[in-house]
């Protein structure tokens, strides 16, 4: 009995000793780690190739930590200085060209064309004869009325003399005087009708193409030819309603035409329509421009740049210096070798440059390339030259 109890105690002790030994083995430090720091790196190199944790992340500006460059030294960036310039505030529009003076020549009376005294496209002076209508009947009426007037004048003179001598009543004298006045008015009417048979240029200008020939019978209002004064031209343009308060007479316009590529014609704002178009919410303005060479024609399509004002000392920087964070615009300003992020307000854009209304002053230096490597709170930087084209 005692021997059986002894064997049982020995078996329990052996099992307990084995359990303790296995636990000690699980919690022991691997020999590779005890050997030194070099063995750990060698063990890491033996990690399976398909283990995601063992893959190396490439060192690029997009994956590098923002302050990694600071740890190794100043970050190389390209930079430019903010320049104060004189900046014109302009608005683009399109319009249509028209002559300063333009008229469609029409007869005021009906008649047959006797002769035409112009060629299409000819330049004429004010008062030049353009078309002569057959005036034989009006001329005869003038001669008849003139003869009647001479007789009435003689009758009145005799009536006046007899009335002074009391041989004729004053009533008879007054009737003779009235007849004289009637015939004077009749003569003036006949002469006016005769004058209208000769159609003349109302002002100096250039004629269009004629629409009639000698022998044609024309009625009142029939079109004979157009006449335009092309020494001065007008350009009508339409602008959004929001610019109405900025329009002033005398503002400069630069006008371009497809017929003359690369050439700009100067003009000035002459007038603004008193009404705003309720449908398009736009206002019509009119500019005036000289045309001494006669190159411009009515109806030409015009591309217009209207100068609303001139900004002196406007701060301009390259567009690539500005970047967006959410709804805000920022640049990196360089001060004493350190780039700090600054919020800015932008304005007009011209030829790859942007106006900075607020945030940067003239003469300050801004980063134009390398912003991705910089920390928002600021980074030490060094300015490098941009790579040469083709280098």
Image (tube, rainbow, N blue to C red):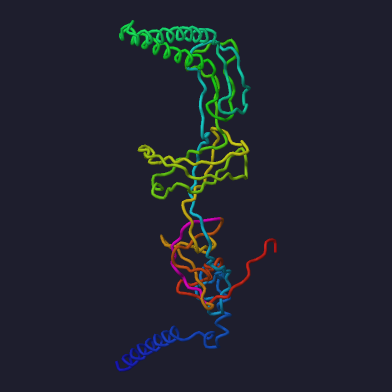
Left-right relation of 168 to 40 = left
Q: Nearer the viewer, residue 95 or 120?
A: 120
Q: Nearer the viewer, residue 338 or 123?
A: 123
Quarter of the figure that contains the C terminus: bottom right
Instruction: Look at the picture and state if 369 lies above or below 188.
Output: below
Left-right relation of 114 to 391 = left
Residue 144 rendering spot, x and y as whole percentages: 49, 6
What's the residue at 54%, 29% (across, down)?
Answer: 203
Instruction: Look at the picture and state if 112 lies above or below 31.
Output: above
Magenta span of residues: 338-350
Instruction: Look at the picture and state if 242 lies above or below 361.
Output: above
Question: What residue occupies the far right of the structure in this picture?
Answer: 391
Please count the marks in the image: 0
Question: What residue occupies the far top of the structure in this picture?
Answer: 167
Residue 57 rendering spot, x and y as whole percentages: 55, 69
Instruction: Look at the picture and state if 178 lies above or below 366.
Output: above
What's the residue at 41%, 41% (across, down)?
Answer: 283
What's the residue at 47%, 40% (across, down)?
Answer: 286
What's the residue at 35%, 88% (across, down)?
Answer: 12
Quarter of the figure that contains the N terminus: bottom left
Q: Is residue 92 magenta?
A: no
Q: Nearer the viewer, residue 220 or 180?
A: 180
Q: Which quarter of the figure has residue 115?
A: top right
Task: Report the predominant secondary structure element of the magenta stretch.
Answer: strand
């Amino acid at each position: 009995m005692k021997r059986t109890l002894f064997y049982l105690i020995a078996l329990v002790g052996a099992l307990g000793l084995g359990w303790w030994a296995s636990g000690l083995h699980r919690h022991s430090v691997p020999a590779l780690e005890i050997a030194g720091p070099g063995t750990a790196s060698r063990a890491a190199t033996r990690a399976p190739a398909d283990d995601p944790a063992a893959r190396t992340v490439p060192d690029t500006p997009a994956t590098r930590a923002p302050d990694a460059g600071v740890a190794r030294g100043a970050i190389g960036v390209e930079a430019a200085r903010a320049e104060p310039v004189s900046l014109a505030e302009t608005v683009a529009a399109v319009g249509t060209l028209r002559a300063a003076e333009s008229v469609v020549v029409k007869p005021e009376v009906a008649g047959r064309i006797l002769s035409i005294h112009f060629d299409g496209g000819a330049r004429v002076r004010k008062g030049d004869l353009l078309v002569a209508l057959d005036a034989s009947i009006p001329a005869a009426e003038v001669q008849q009325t003139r003869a009647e007037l001479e007789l009435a004048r003689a009758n009145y003179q005799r009536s006046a003399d007899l009335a002074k001598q009391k041989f004729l009543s004053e009533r008879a004298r007054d009737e003779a005087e009235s007849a004289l006045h009637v015939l004077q008015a009749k003569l003036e009417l006949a002469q006016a009708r005769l004058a209208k048979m000769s159609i003349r240029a109302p002002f100096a200008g250039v004629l269009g193409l004629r629409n009639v020939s000698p022998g044609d019978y024309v009625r009142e209002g029939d079109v004979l030819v157009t006449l335009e004064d092309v020494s001065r031209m007008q350009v009508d343009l339409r602008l959004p309603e929001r610019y109405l308060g900025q329009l002033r007479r005398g503002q400069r316009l630069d006008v371009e035409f497809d017929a003359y590529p690369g050439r700009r014609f100067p003009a000035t704002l002459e007038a603004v329509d008193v009404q705003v178009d309720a449908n398009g919410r736009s206002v019509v303005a009119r500019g005036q421009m000289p045309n001494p060479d006669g190159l411009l024609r009515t109806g030409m399509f015009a591309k217009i740049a209207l100068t609303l004002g001139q900004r002196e000392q406007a701060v301009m920087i390259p567009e690539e210096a500005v970047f967006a964070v959410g709804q805000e615009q920022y640049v990196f300003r360089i001060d004493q070798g350190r780039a700090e992020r600054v919020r800015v307000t932008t304005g007009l854009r011209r030829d790859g440059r942007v106006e900075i209304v607020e945030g940067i002053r003239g003469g300050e230096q801004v980063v134009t390339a390398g912003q991705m490597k910089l920390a928002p709170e600021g980074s030490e930087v060094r300015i490098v030259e941009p790579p040469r084209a083709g280098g």
